[in-house]
Amino acid sequence: MRLEPIANPSALRTLAPPALAISATVIVASLLAMAAGANPFAVLGEILKGAAGSQFALLETLNRATPLIFTGLAVAVAFRAKLWNIGAEAQLYAGALVTVVLGTGALGWPSAALIPTLIIASLLAGALLLLVPALLKVRLGVDEVVTTLLLNFIFLLFVSMLLEGPLKDPMGMGWPKSPRLIEEARLPRIIEGLRLHWGFGIALIAAVLVWVIQARTTLGYEMRAVGLSRDAARFAGIPVGLVLIKTALLSGGLAALAGFSEVAGLKGALTLDLSPGFGYTGIIVAMLALLNPLGVIAAALFVAGIFVGADSMSRALDVPTYLADIMLAKALLLMVLAILLTRFRVVRE
Amino acid sequence: MPEQTEAQVVLRLDQITKTFGALTANNAVSLALHKGEVIALLGENGAGKTTLMNILFGQYTADSGTVEVFGKPLPPGNPRAALEAGVGMVHQHFTLAENMTVLENVALGTQGLGAWRFDARAARARILALSSDFKLAVDPDARVGTLTVGERQRVEILKALYREARILILDEPTAVLTPQETDDLFETLRKAVALGLSIIFISHKLHEVMAISNRVVILRHGKVVHEGPIGETDKRDLAARMVGSEVSAPKVEPGTPGPAMLSLKAVSTPDRGAAPGLKALDLDLFAGQITGLAGVSGNGQAALADLIGGMQGPSAGALHLKGIAPQGWSPRTAVHAGIARIPEDRHKTGTIADFDLTENAILERYTDAPFSYKGWMYWRAAQDFARSVIERYDVRCPGPGTRIRLLSGGNMQKLILGRVLEGAPEIILANQPVRGLDIGAVNYVHSQLLAARDRGAAVLLISEDLDEIMALSDVIHVISEGRLSPPFARGTMSPTELGVWMAGQGFEEMAHAS
């Protein structure tokens, strides 16, 4: 069997593979559920119910999707310019860190002033953290995959050190945990009485803004040009290095907002388990979305739904939650295959 | 083929049809190649030559029709089968690993999975034997990255011969070669034919087709429109059959020179690896004149093009535009100073393959009004611009939203021409503007350059095709190892005399005289 490129894929060919990818994911999950000794229909039903079966479930999914939208956007923006930012996890913690440094009483301002300040400070922190690898790449040609990936571990250990030392909550019974944010630093709920904070709203706004930047501004045009052909971009006079730096600032800032929104909207304090790998899952989200910023919203909801649904399914049926990880890994692999199939046709010998 | 029935048919394509969506790339194409024969496959871009060869070589599967090699049918869609049957292809774009040696490149993939030791000595002996048999001079231990284009092509041919190819397919092999390298290639091909190999030679250059082939097959719109011995035809006839109507090269009247638009005064640039930089070079480009730059590939043409195109500033000396030294020097300042840049490699540097025509049309000017204002793109203006370029420069495409990768080389070049000529530039840097284009597109590009010259633009034409330089240029300079010859007026030098300068002689006497 071989692959043959398709010049102009039809609409059916573009839409069918992703649909098939999701169906195949469901089938594989069913088989695994059977292997775990459960009825596959019950498992899928419970996942669906757990993800969207009630108001509570739905809000839980939206809350879980919020950091994934931010990290998904961060990755989508960077990958579009072929800047391989694998460090969204560290940038997320950078955002969370400045949020607790400034939001636990250091600035005693009212919400209207404090929250925008925290947002800007988080953006800057994430941007600065990715600026270092970006500069190393542009100036010295150091591979950003390595630097951003390794920075994740370095930065997490740095946060851990702070939580054991200067940032440790004196009232925390000895746990490595920061003090709680002051009330003015907390993100309010979107609708009073519903457990959904404004982080979700900010994430939606961010997705639209990123889309506008990519489609309607010269910077977006430059980022796409640099991503598709550095040689042609350089020849045309696009300042390739500068564009990569700007991309890094935007990407790092977006990832940091995930940390801000988790601390200020949900947790209220910084702990080392703030992110169960949101930065890495952002890569899956961005790939599932084909790097489209609006697609990131849908992909983040899908991924969050599976996680939340699997949690409640596990409680109800005693099937391990690892099923969620397998489903996501499957979905990603099948999606990559699906993308291949929209561009190539399989030819049999 | 009644005239050749006595020779063995080594390759037979029978009724090959291949469609891509609505496009029929090959329509019932049949062809028979005999032992010791060179067939020239002619056709404009998009006529279906490359598709046909890809089917033969197993890159594509035909919708219908069969391929037979040495009387045995070839399983479709399997490159390995074609290789094993003795078909070797030398692609237009080389498929070599630059960081490996010639020896490693040639031997790569020839060993079975079971073999766990590589017999380098035997491989080297075979390569040396092949290179002397076929006159393919190349050092087996040289890294491919350090080789010239001509040498790389020899490695590609060696690769095919090493795999015991009895049938060679060469896809526009001379498009990247200098006249001298082309002569060397032809000598190799004649050796190969004398040793019983058969060759399919794909080219646009009619005098080469006349020089090397026994028979010619012409494709147009995917169909064979002519087939016959080369002796029964001539260049005019071939050209007419290829495009389906009479073609004529633009008539060239001498230009009337105006003031110097761009002057280089004792300009030097650093060497880049094996490619020499410029060595204290003086050059004036005059309005209303085409200045031709002749030279063997890799003698500083790239450095000069980069300098004038704004990719690199001079490390010594000065660049003046109409007598004034520009502030800073970048691609953007060059474009805004009215320099139209037609780059050497339209695929890699001239366009972005996955951008559509609109996005490619504004690539150099997206920061300017009306395409953007204060960082916001005005796509409607960009699309209008692309539409006007498409219309005025006859770019054949479904529309401005088409990705440029789907266009033929000629249409891609027309878009680049339109992009740079729409601003009525005063200086035109045309670097290999017709490389790999078919006759119709070549004539079109040349007539556009002549029209721009007559409008008063100063044109610098860089080409490795001496015929092109001599036909178009009002003044010719030869470049050799980064040094520039004195200007020679139109018609004062023969190709042989220019060849002497191209080989690097004459520069010493020039240095002595000064």
Image (tube, coloured by chain):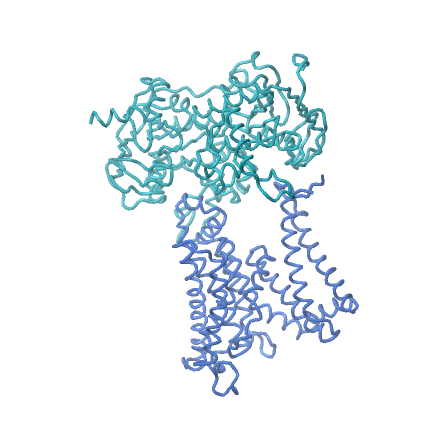
Chain colours: A blue, B cyan
Q: Residue B421 sits in which quadrant? A: top left
Measured along the vertical axis of the image, is residue B159 above or below residue B509?
A: below
Asked whether A192 or B417 is in front, the reply is B417
Asked whether B396 or B58 is in front, the reply is B58
Residue A304 percent coordinates (x, y): 63, 67
Q: Farthest left residue?
A: B514
Task: Locate the C terminus of chain A and report the quarter of the image it occupies.
Answer: top right
Q: Would residue B483 appear left or right of A298 to someone viewing this image?
A: left
Q: Would residue B481 appear left or right of B204 to someone viewing this image?
A: left
Residue B210 percent coordinates (x, y): 52, 17
Asked whether residue B482 appears in the rendered view, the answer is yes
Residue A268 percent coordinates (x, y): 52, 79
At x 23%, y 28%, the residue is B511
Measured along the vertical axis of the image, is residue B503 above or below residue A325?
A: above
Task: Tell how many labels.
Answer: 0
Asked whether B86 or A343 is in front, the reply is B86
Residue B308 percent coordinates (x, y): 33, 38
Task: Locate the N terminus of chain A and report the quarter of the image it occupies.
Answer: top right
Q: Residue A120 sits in which quadrant? A: bottom left
Asked whether A107 or A342 is in front, the reply is A342
Asked whether residue B410 appears in the rendered view, the answer is no
At x 71%, y 73%, the residue is A314
